[in-house]
Image (cartoon, rainbow, N blue to C red):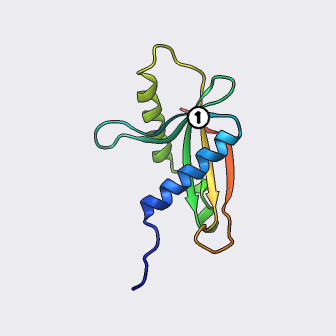
């Protein structure tokens, strides 16, 4: 019987774990994973991290097997950015004071399913803003 390989969810979880490990090695600390707003049409933030200077970092993780169609970074639409900003505002409403914040993207490029192939990880700091 042929194996289907990992599911889309498993691949996504592995990508988020790879991104979190990359950011942890860079000195950030993990605050939350997969923060979701309640209800339909809300947003989700893959990782919420805190930088060494106290900045709260909302991280979108994008994973693509190839550079076709612009690669991982090009896959973040204006609608996706709006949903991330919405979720970030929702998260911040729970805090007594708002720390400095930024929106980062971690791009994972390459096929981790190929033997000997290690995907590249690119961290884009301040990839977009809340406007």
Viewport quadrant of the N terminus: bottom left
Q: Can residue 55 be seen in this view?
A: yes
User: Disc 1 marks which residue?
Assistant: 129
Looking at the image, which residue is at 68% across and 27% down?
52
In the depicted structure, whether residue 35 falls above or below residue 10? above
Q: How many marks?
A: 1
In the depicted structure, whether residue 106 falls above or below residue 114? above
Looking at the image, which residue is at 41% across and 21% down?
94
Front residue of 58 and 42: 58
Front residue of 71 and 19: 19
In the depicted structure, whether residue 105 falls above or below residue 130? below
Residue 63 at x, y percent in the picture: 56, 58
Quarter occupied by residue 42: top left
Looking at the image, which residue is at 62% across and 61% down?
71
Viewport quadrant of the C terminus: top right
Residue lying at the far top in this picture: please name it.
Answer: 96
Give the crowd class for mark 1: few <14, some 14-19, many >=20 residues within 10 Å.
few
Looking at the image, which residue is at 47% across and 46% down?
80
Quarter occupied by residue 56: top right
Q: Can residue 131 be seen in this view?
A: no
Residue 4 at x, y percent in the picture: 43, 76
Residue lying at the far bottom in this picture: please name it.
Answer: 1
């Amino acid at each position: 019987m042929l194996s289907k390989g990992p599911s889309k969810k498993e691949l996504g979880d592995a990508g988020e774990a790879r991104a979190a490990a990359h950011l942890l090695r860079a000195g950030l600390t993990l605050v939350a994973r997969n923060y979701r707003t309640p209800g339909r049409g809300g947003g989700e933030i893959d990782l919420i991290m805190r930088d060494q200077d106290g900045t709260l970092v909302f991280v979108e993780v994008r994973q693509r097997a190839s550079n076709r169609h612009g690669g991982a970074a090009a896959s973040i639409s204006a609608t996706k950015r709006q949903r991330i900003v919405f979720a970030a505002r929702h998260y911040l409403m729970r805090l007594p004071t708002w720390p400095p914040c930024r929106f980062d993207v971690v791009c994972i490029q390459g096929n981790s399913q190929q033997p000997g192939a290690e995907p590249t990880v690119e961290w884009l700091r301040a990839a977009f803003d809340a406007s």
